Each structure stands twice: as C-alpha cells, then as structure tokens.
Image (cartoon, rainbow, N blue to C red):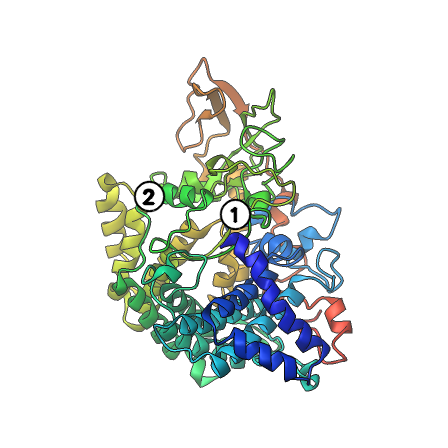
Amino acid sequence: MKKIIIISGIILSGLLSSCQDYLEAPAKSSLDESVIFSTAGLAKGAVDGIKVPFAETNSYRGRFLSWYGLNTDTEWYNSSESTTDDKPSLCTYDAKPNNSQMNTTNNVWAMMYAGIERANICIRGLRQYGNPTPGSDLGHLLGESLTLRAIYYADLLKTWGDVPARFEPITSETIYLPKTSRDVIYKQLIADLGEAAELCPWPNENANTASVERINKAFVKGFRARLAMVAGGYQQYPDGIHRSTDADLSVERMYTLALTECRSVIQSGKARLEPSFETLWKKYNQENTTAGGESLWELPFADGRGRMLFTFAVLHTSVDQFQANGSNKGGVAGPLPNVFYDYDQTDSRRDVTCVPYKYGTAVAGIAKQQLNAFNKWYFGKYRYEWMNRFVTSTNDDGINKLYMRYAEVLLIAAEAANEIEGPSAAAPYLKELRRRAFAPSVQAVKVDAYVDALNSKPAMFNAIVDEHKFEFTGEMERKQALIRWNLLKTKLDDAKVRMTNLRDHTGDYATVPTTLYFKYKTDNVSLDIYGLNRGETTNPGAPYTSFSWNSLVDTKINSLYKLGVDPDNRQFWPIWQVFIDGSNGKLVNDYGY
C-alpha cells in the first residue's frame, strides 16, 4: 500500500488538472470518470489518490502531525521556552497568522482542501457511474472516499473551528467560499460516516480490509463516535465557549449515537486490545499493519515519507546502530516531567510512555543510552530501536500515524455510557482497559476495587479523564479531549502546579528522589536505573554512578502556554495570512486574531 499510494495519485491528478483548468468543461473529464469509476481497479487508484496530500512536504507529514496537539497537561514541545523561531508559538497558544512555519501556500490547510477535492471527485464519480452497494468493491471505495473526506474535515475543524464547506467538486461559482458553521459540517460528516459504515466491510471480512491502511467498518464506527462526542462537547465559538445550540447535536443525541457505534464495534469482535501495551507499540514501530487488532486505521506513509519517529522518537544524538535518519532525530516533544509520577507505579503503560534517557553520540557506530535533564523526557511509544528496518532517509522515517485504536472506543463507550446510563454501565469498559495495564496479581485492587468505587457520574467522569491521560500521552489526542470537556485551561494550570510541586518536592511529589543511580546492562548500551521510583533513595553503591536530577525552573514550567495568554481563548490556530489574502475577501480570522 505505501508505494501504491504514490503512484495512484496519477489517475486522480489528471482529473484534478482537468477540473482546475476547465472548471465548467465536462466533456473529457466526464468520459474519463465514466470509465474510471465504473471499474473497481481504476477507481481504487483514484481513491488511493485521496491520501496523497497527507504526505506532501508541508502537510500532515512535516507540519500538522509535528505541531498540532502540543501543549497539554501531559505533553509539550521540549523547547517551548525558546524564542529563536516561531515553532513554540504553535504549541503555546500564541500562533499568529503570519507564522513562518505555516504561512505558505502549500501548507496543510491547502493540502487538506486538496484531499477534499480529490474525495469529492471520487464520491461524485462513484455515485454517478459505479453502482456502489454494500458488499461490492465499488461500495467499499465510496465508503472509503466518504471517510477520508471526513478525516480531512475533522482535522480542519479541530484545528480552525468554522471553515469553508466543500462537498462538491469546485466550479467557477465556488472557487471562493466563506466559512460555514462547524455544526453544519459535523452533521454532514456524521451522516456520511453512517453511510460509509454500511458500505465498508469489517476488518478481515475480505482481502480489501486485511490491512489497517484501508478503511474498515470498525474504524468508521469508532471515528463516527469520536466526532459525535466532539460535536456534542464544548468548544470555542466566535461568541464564547459552549456546547452547540443545534438540537441535532445535543448531548443526549450525540452521546447516544457514540455509545451505539462503540457497542457495535465492541460486540462485533472484529477489533481488540493488544494483550500487552508494550507489544502494541513494538508492533506499531515494526510496521505491522494487520487488521483486526487494536489499530483501527493508520494514516499511511511510504518508506521515504512521514516524520513520526523523526519528530517524536526517543532522541538519537547521532547516526548509530539503530538509525541513519541523521543527528538529533526524535526528541522534539515529550511528556511533562510530572507525568511519570502521576502513573501508578505498577501501571505497565508508564515505562513504555515516559523515557528519561536519550542515545548519546555513537562511538564506532554504537550509541549508548544517557540520562537526560529532569525537565526533558521523551515518548517511548516511538522508538527507532523497535523498528524492523534500518532508516536511511535523511528527512523521513516512513512510520504511519496511528490515527485511532480500539482503546479509544472503550473509553468513549465508558464516557457516553456514564452520561446516558450511569457509572455502572461505564464500569465494564473502563475495567477492560485497566486490566491490560495491570498485572493479574494486582487487578483485584487496581482494576476491580478501583472502578467499583466510582459510584457517581462525576467520580466516573474524572476517572475517565485520568485514564485518557495514562492511555494516550504521546499520541496528541489530549488537546481536543480537554477542549470538548471544557478543561483546557483548568488542566494546563493544574499541570503547572504539579510541575512546581515536583520541582519543590512537595504535595504528591514529596517522596520523589532527587538523585538517580545508573549502570549499564550486559549489552553495554541499555541503562539500569535506580532512583526513578518513589522511595528509591538509598545509594545502591558500586557499580552504580550517581546522577543529580532536579532541574526544573519557572521559565520552563511557565512555557506550557505563553504568559498573558488565555488558552481557552486560543483553542484554534489562526487561518494563515496567505489563505486570508487569497480568499477574495471571503475569509477572516475570529477569536481576536
């Protein structure tokens, strides 16, 4: 699939060129569409072409995935305090329309709309010429097209709020459009995904859904549930933060829809949690794209495109035994330093998610792990050392973006069930997720007793908010969740307090050690660390070496968001100036930009 996508765009690019050059001249384009979209093999090439804009230079590949979703109460840009360029402002709720990283005509905004245009052409062609029915290849391709368009729109909405709506190919009358209410767009997407769910097969129902690089019914339903929760949640509108006032997007309707879709996925047995959290992420880094497990859909990158490890992996200081991606690859972002200590010490997700070391400069091609400063952690979910191939590209790593996994279906089900039916209905879903996180020997306390004690809606909701943190840190899903819960600034401020208490060793962090002790394991590469856990304060002696570990200053803590800025008034990025200038006066920025 990864290499096919690069080639498949050729089919659709011809149609796009025809559309752009001769907006109202249907003769050749119509003839081409009648052939392409009535033939499953040709139509598949066109639908694969919808994905091409994901990987363009300044699109998802190197701009959107690298920056959207930082900073939250769990994750941050590791150089948020820097003043040398415009990168920190994208994360610290202070982005300007002329941001130098984003204000280009080939930015992700343009690429999202390029993907939408490709999808619109495919949707029109398949409806007109393809006879797309459930169970047919052409039906699946229509379902994929509808879903891919919804992905582009969902990411536009979470990043910019109200945006122009295009659900038909561009004509001379629709070149320039004003913003459309996001409520209108959400309703269209939810309806489209309802249709797509009827058209797409379950994972492994046939050869077309054997890989999570193809759209399947489990993902469509899970994604529809996610959008319903967002549409029914809080967010910043031009007139303030509130839920939608559209009755069709009420909490009751949206949460009920989300719960129905999640239960459909759960009861189908067509997706499941990976039994081990560490194995889940090892398989991800090993590029195991077999459907039917925890990954529901992955945004696919060719081997020479994509920057998930390039950006987020444990830092590699130089080319070494694990990668030839280059020097200082990975480590751009990481968990807040308190997050490691917010986990239960027996939670298996902790050490996978939070890594306190980097790989130092290689000697004779071999790099060793080295402890970091206290204020800089890395995401252990992304590791070159877990890959099956050796990355030689100097710009990209080819690792997919894991867009949605079954764990989120369980948490959405728990949240929606709690709201609609009460905490006892939510408990089984939360227990299932926590059961994976804790060893059988402690499950009676950490799973059953813990969840059974959540006997009110507020208690269950707060536990779900915490569980989301422990499950998804490093996946950049937290920001949108905090926004829809109306907890963005509240949780950011709480994180500042937590980091301050950690620095001062007070409150919940009073027993966190200030000195680490390390030695190398028998491979002479991996660290054996003592002193990370609370209570590990006794010097273990030789052959361990001590390491002072308590550097966290106010400047760093306060860089979580820019001082003087209210994150609740900056929930979205501004539309970049090049698109404002090129909109023929149709587009403006809201929210005080």
Residue at position x 26%, y 60% in the image: 269
- Image quarter of the C terminus: bottom right
Instruction: Determine crowd level at label 1: few under 14, some 14-19, many 20+ residues with C-alpha closer than 10 A.
Output: many
Left or right of 398 on screen, residue 539: left
Location of residue 204 (image quadrant): bottom left
From the top left corner, tell me how far across and down residue 574 is, in percent. 68, 67
The crowd level at tag 2 (other Cα within 10 Å; few <14, some 14-19, many 20+) is some
**Camera-nearest residue between 100 and 322:** 322
Given residues 288 and 47, the one toward you in this image is 47
Q: Which mark is residue 276?
A: 2
Q: Is residue 300 left or right of residue 270?
A: right
Pick whichever, 165 or 347, lies toward us.
165
Residue 480 location (% of width, % of height): 51, 63
Q: Is 144 situated left or right of 330 in this image?
A: left
Dot 1 or dot 2: first in sequence order is 2
Mark 1 secondary-structure assignment: loop
Residue 459 visible to the viewer: no
**Which three-letter amino acid code belongs to the residue tagged 1?**
Ile
Q: Disc number at residue 413?
A: none
Query: Residue drawn 36% across and 78% down?
Result: 252
Q: Provide residue 92's location: percent of width, then percent of height.
A: 64, 55
Residue at (68%, 62%) from the top-left corner?
Answer: 107
Up the image or down, 210 lies above or below 322; here it is below
Q: Amino acid at mark 2?
A: Ser
- Secondary structure, mark 2, is loop
Identify the residue shown where x is 39% and y is 30%.
535
Question: What residue sits right under mark 1 in the picture?
Answer: 399
Q: What is the spatial separation of the Cα atoms under label 1 and label 2, in whole angstroms?
A: 21 Å
